[in-house]
């Protein structure tokens, strides 16, 4: 399997996984905006603890019309930019094109299914710490991490395994799962408290874990998320919850993407990461007072 792959959203996540796949020999085509000229001139650079990898020749394009139909579209745009997809996606779609959304929070799978058809849609969760540190350059702090892949509303198919094998061949620990919805709730166990508290207080994950009161709030939020997942039929064990704290301690003074976006004056994915999980829990009859307070505070902060 050597599919053609379009990366739509060439920020840190899109650049990282796209470059990894291209370095392994895959046919990867990047939709670029601000970095287009720099990438065409100098290529892409991945800086990780085990060394620096450079991709000198990059298939970078300004429009999806220039890219044309591909076998796999990987969506790594922020969910706040999903309104652009109705324009961006059609030129990329052939009869059997798969659309893989690596977006945060809840709601992106349903949005994509309504846009391109549920049969095309897969979702993925990126457990990784990376940042875009210069045009065409990504630095990994906890990479390659783990990538979880699942089908929207279906168990794993042969195509899911083949796509996971492609990522694995590029050096990414990629794991297919039968329940994409459960995997998304598991990711929220980390995303809701760590993204939220670092944004709210203007600090790093290291600062959160060094403060007893914030660590207690962090753990309370994690328990609320696990409780909401359980109410919706997705079991998240205590061992998994504690592991999310344990894997974060070695990250040091890491600032998650939502806090970085807020400091840079960019839109934050408030609805996908905090609002939609809260609404789904409330619709199932479950109160989430900690998440409710955090969601209200983040809406206030990001509206300024």
Image (cartoon, rainbow, N blue to C red):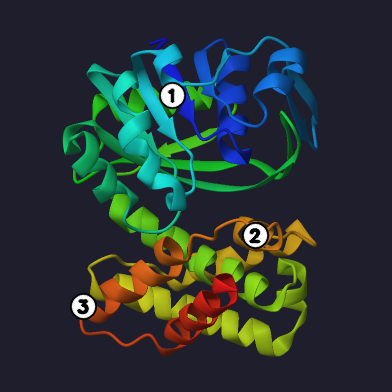
Residue 247 badge:
2
Looking at the picture, tell me which residue is in the foreground, 233 or 74: 74
Helix, strand or loop at label 3? It is helix
Looking at the picture, tell me which residue is in the foreground, 222 or 72: 72
Helix, strand or loop at label 1? It is helix
Residue 187 badge:
none
Apparent side of residue 57 relative to residue 302 in the rendered image (left or right): right
Apparent side of residue 246 relative to residue 54 in the rendered image (left or right): left
Residue 155 in sight? no
Residue 283 badge:
3
- Residue at x 38% of width, y 56% of height: 184
- Residue at x 65% of width, y 82% of height: 215
Q: Give percent across and percent down for residue 203.
A: 75, 72
Apparent side of residue 246 relative to residue 28 in the rendered image (left or right): right
- Using a 10 Å C-alpha cutoff, classify the residue at mark 3 as few (fewer than 14 neighbours), some (14 to 19) or many (20 or more): few
Which quadrant holds residue 134? top right
- Residue at x 60% of width, y 38% of height: 11
Choose the circle earlier in sequence order: 3 or 2: 2
Helix, strand or loop at label 2? It is loop
- Report the Cα–Cα distance between label 3 and label 2: 32 Å
Q: Which residue is mark 1?
A: 165
Q: Give percent across and percent down for residue 82.
A: 39, 46
- Using a 10 Å C-alpha cutoff, classify the residue at mark 2 as few (fewer than 14 neighbours), some (14 to 19) or many (20 or more): few
Which quadrant of the figure contains the C terminus?
Answer: bottom right
Residue situated furthest front in the rendering: 304
Question: Which-is-in-front pick, marks 1 and 3?
Answer: 3
Residue 71 sits above or below residue 304 on the image: above
Which quadrant of the figure contains the N terminus?
Answer: top left
């Amino acid at each position: 399997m050597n599919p053609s792959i379009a990366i739509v959203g060439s920020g840190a996540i899109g650049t990282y996984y796209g470059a990894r796949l291209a370095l392994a020999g895959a046919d990867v085509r990047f939709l670029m905006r601000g970095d287009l000229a720099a990438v065409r001139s100098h290529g892409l650079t991945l800086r990780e603890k085990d060394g620096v990898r450079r991709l000198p020749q990059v298939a970078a394009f300004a429009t999806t019309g220039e890219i044309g139909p591909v076998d796999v579209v990987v969506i790594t745009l922020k969910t706040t930019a999903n309104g652009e997809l109705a324009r961006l996606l059609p030129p990329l779609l052939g009869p059997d094109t798969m659309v893989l959304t690596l977006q945060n929070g809840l709601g992106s799978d349903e949005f994509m299914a309504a846009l391109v058809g549920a049969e095309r849609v897969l979702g993925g969760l990126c457990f990784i710490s990376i940042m875009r540190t210069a045009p065409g350059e990504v630095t990994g702090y906890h990479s390659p991490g783990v990538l979880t892949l699942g089908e929207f509303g279906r168990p794993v198919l042969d195509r899911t395994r083949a796509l996971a094998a492609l990522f694995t061949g590029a050096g990414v620990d990629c794991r297919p799962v039968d329940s994409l919805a459960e995997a998304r709730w598991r990711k929220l166990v980390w995303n809701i408290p760590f993204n939220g508290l670092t944004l709210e207080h203007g600090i790093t994950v290291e600062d959160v874990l060094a403060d007893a009161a914030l660590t207690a709030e962090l753990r309370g939020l994690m328990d609320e998320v696990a409780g909401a997942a359980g109410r919706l039929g997705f079991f998240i064990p205590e061992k998994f919850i504690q592991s999310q704290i344990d894997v974060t301690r070695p990250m040091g003074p890491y600032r998650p993407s939502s806090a970085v976006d807020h400091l840079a004056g960019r839109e934050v994915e408030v609805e996908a990461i905090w609002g939609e999980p809260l609404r789904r829990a409330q619709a199932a009859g479950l109160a989430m007072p900690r998440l409710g307070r955090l969601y209200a505070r983040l809406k206030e902060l990001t509206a300024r």
